[in-house]
Amino acid sequence: MSRVKAPLLVVGDALLDRDLTGTADRLIPDAPVPVVTERAHRMRAGGAALAACLAAEDGRDVTLITGVGDDSASEELRRLLDGRVKVIGLPLTGALPEKTRVLVQGHPVVRLDRGDGNVREATNEAREAVRSAPALLVSDYGRGAADALRDVLAERPPAVWDPHPRGGPPVPGTRLVTPARAEARMFATAAMDDATGSSGSDLRAAAREAAALVRHWGAASVAVTLGARGALLSYGDHPLLVPAAAAHDGDPCGAGDRFSATAAGLLADGALVGEAVEGAVIAASQFVAGGGAGGMTAGARPGGASPPSAGERARPGAPPEPHSVIARVRASGGTVVAAGGCFDLLHAGHVGLLQAARRIGNCLVVCINSDASVRRRKGEGRPVNPLADRVRVLRALECVDAVAVFDEDTPERLLAELRPDVWVKGGDYSGAELPEAALLQLWGGQAVLLPYLDGRSSTALMARAAKGAR
């Protein structure tokens, strides 16, 4: 039976985020500026509202205290949050801030900002909510929400404070503060000698800055997020480096919110700070791999399964599950590629095939035979490696986004469920009819062959190993 997750109160500044995605293949005549042909326009909750949504989609009851007004952006934000997060509004002096990114082939080319709203004052409802909250996350985007409630937050120091260069310092006693690397460097300038902070390697400098910030802020701990490198956790002395299991080249937008929301939730569930940071690194890495905030759809969260609950240790580097990967790729207009096989003894032929398959589209889901399915196909003594080992090896490959298992002799049922755009087989099937080709046509998909490295097979590898043993 799964454990009920603790509720969370998020205090911070909400934004309305927009993504305009398109293509560009020419410049305008009078300047070296690309002409972007719009293909999709998506809106989503941003800032503290994104952190609140991520915590809610982890399975928590979440309340958000944030500035909202009567402007159109505030109305749109309320619509996006309706049914997902309870909102306690604080009055704004202007319109809710909006941030619009223009992306070409998944890469931002410009961002347009508008709206200068700042929180005018706290309300009694907000103060009482802070006083009675079992766990607090402050997501400070420098628009006044945290400052308006600073006095009552000092009475109830938050579990996590995610700071912003425009915002104020976290209140003393905060359990975990989560600045990004550049933010930590900037904050530490006021807390330590410049020469001290800039000497040594980058990790050494980050460790010194984090330790200085623990003392300067009066925080229990500081975790400096390092992007693809993970996070560095300091209690003021010897730091703990929590590396990311794998580097991903996905959209990092929102990764900091994913990190802070996960860490706050795990601390609320009773995790130790080190466990919370480890879970947050895993979740943020999965989030980026899944397309970041830009890959989110209503009610769906990049990053697959929920982060580990307190006392549980998540498997490092666990990729998103196949359905989540496919949904995010399709939401952005991408191409889903699938490949299948036993992959009993992974060899160069397998790796070359999978790498080539991944280059065809925007994600690769590998469909793998269960142990019973392999045994029926290959006979007793197979597979040599059990399913868990085969899945783990495949997931370790950078070109593999997700792995799905089927128990039948053929993957037709699984393919009908996943409905990939492209189904890939190795060139050793040349001259034979691809049995899945007709199935793919039902939804407009295509089965293709890819060149296969000659002389590579699990059977040949086993034969050579047996000969060497003799």
Image (tube, helix red, strand yellow):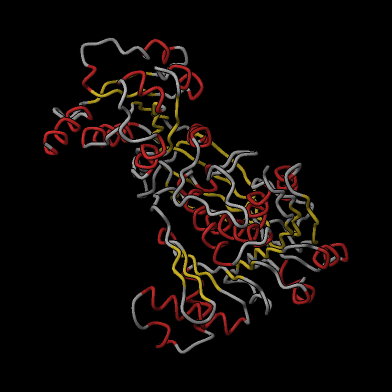
Locate residue 470, reporting x and y percent.
11, 36
Name the one closer to the observer, 403 or 451.
403
Q: Is residue 449 above or below residue 362?
A: above
Q: Is residue 164 above or below residue 451?
A: below
Q: Residue at x 62, y 45 (%)?
A: 44
Q: Residue furthest front?
A: 470
Q: Residue furthest right?
A: 124
Q: Is residue 304 left or right of residue 149?
A: left
* Mark count: 0
Locate residue 362, reporting x and y percent.
40, 36
In which quadrant of the rendered view does residue 356 lie? Answer: top left
Name the one closer to the observer, 441 or 409.
409
Q: Quadrant of the N terminus?
A: top right
Name the one closer to the observer, 242 or 187.
242
Q: Residue at x 21, y 20 (%)?
A: 428
In which quadrant of the rendered view does residue 432 lie? Answer: top left
Q: Residue at x 78, y 76 (%)?
A: 155
Q: Residue at x 34, y 81 (%)?
A: 200
Q: Is residue 186 above or below residue 5?
A: below
Locate residue 465, reporting x and y percent.
16, 36
Locate residue 367, reporting x and y percent.
40, 28
Q: Is residue 424 left or right of residue 455?
A: right
Name the one closer to the observer, 326 or 413.
413
